[in-house]
Amino acid sequence: MTALTLTRLTRSFRAGTCGCSATVSVLRGASLALWPGEIVALEGERGSGKSTLLRCAAGLMRPDSGEVRWLGARVPVPDAAAYFGAAAHAKRGALYTRLGYALAHRCRIVLLDDLDLLCSLEQRLIIALLYRSTLAGASVLYAASGALGSPSFATRSVALAHGVIVQRKKRSAARIAASSPASRARASARSTYGRSFRSPQ
């Protein structure tokens, strides 16, 4: 059974001034399945709708259409999912403390927004904490921005572009753990963009 299932989610927001009937479509049929013990990187540029997708997945925002299932249920399972937005990054160490508390109380689904805003030390501490939680069956979906959004610790990466989710190549957790930092970086580049980065000649 999947930990989290998003089926054809759509979400629009009103645009312009008060009384304007124009809308902006952020999600246009986004679908994703998150399995127990999986760490999935949600990539995309700023403004692509990653935060909207995570809030819909956490039950904090209602999509215009589509379905969200938590552990097979159509209603949020109490304490099963935890969402950590940018507010959790405001104070150094706050995210690590809140995340540790949620996982200690058997949180099964972790949704992290803007993980790349943290300093490298906090990222390493949180990554170690997430690894331990996935060994116990928890699932992680986190958003990252920029061209090198997903670190190599993710078992799978997906991209949110034009309101839909594009699946990327899945990487074996065993291969990631056994590889060197340089080879992990090359594998991340190939799986994300279909080729390795090369300097112009």
Image: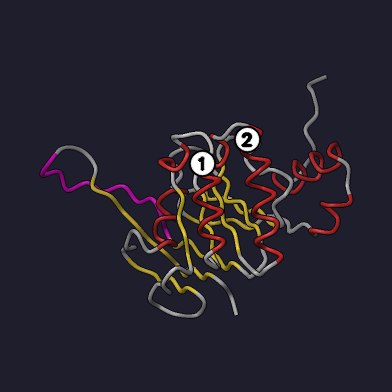
Q: In the current view of this chain or complex, which residue is farthest to the left?
A: 19
Quarter-wise, where is residue 166 in the image? bottom right
Q: Is residue 199 above or below residue 30?
A: above
Q: Position of residue 114 (x, y in %)?
A: 51, 41
- CA gap between label 1 and label 2 equals 14 Å
Question: Is 127 on the left or on the right of 33, as rendered?
Answer: right
Quick one: label 1 or label 2, which is nearer the N terminus? 1
Element assignment for label 2: loop
- Residue type at mark 1 is Asp
Name the residue rendered at 46%, 74% in the picture: 69
Residue assigned mark 1: 114
- Residue type at mark 2 is Ala
Q: Residues within 10 Å of mark 2 (few under 14, many from 20)?
A: few
Q: In the current view of this chain or complex, which residue is farthest to the top?
A: 201
Q: Is 25 in the magenta? A: yes
Q: Residues within 10 Å of mark 1 (few under 14, many from 20)?
A: some
Q: Is residue 116 above or below residue 61?
A: above
Name the residue rendered at 68%, 68% in the picture: 136
Q: Position of residue 161 (x, y in %)?
A: 52, 48
Q: Position of residue 121 (x, y in %)?
A: 66, 34
Question: Is 67 on the left or on the right of 178, as rendered?
Answer: left
Q: What range is drawn magenta here?
A: 18-28
Instruction: Give the colouring mode of the picture.
Output: secondary structure
Name the residue rendered at 73%, 59% in the picture: 170
- Camera-near label (1 vs 2) is 1
Question: Is 182 on the left or on the right of 61, as rendered?
Answer: right
Residue assigned mark 2: 147
Q: Is 44 in the magenta? A: no
Question: Is 8 on the left or on the right of 185, as rendered?
Answer: left
Q: Position of residue 36 (x, y in %)?
A: 64, 70
Element assignment for label 1: loop
Q: Nearer the viewer, residue 144 or 194?
A: 144
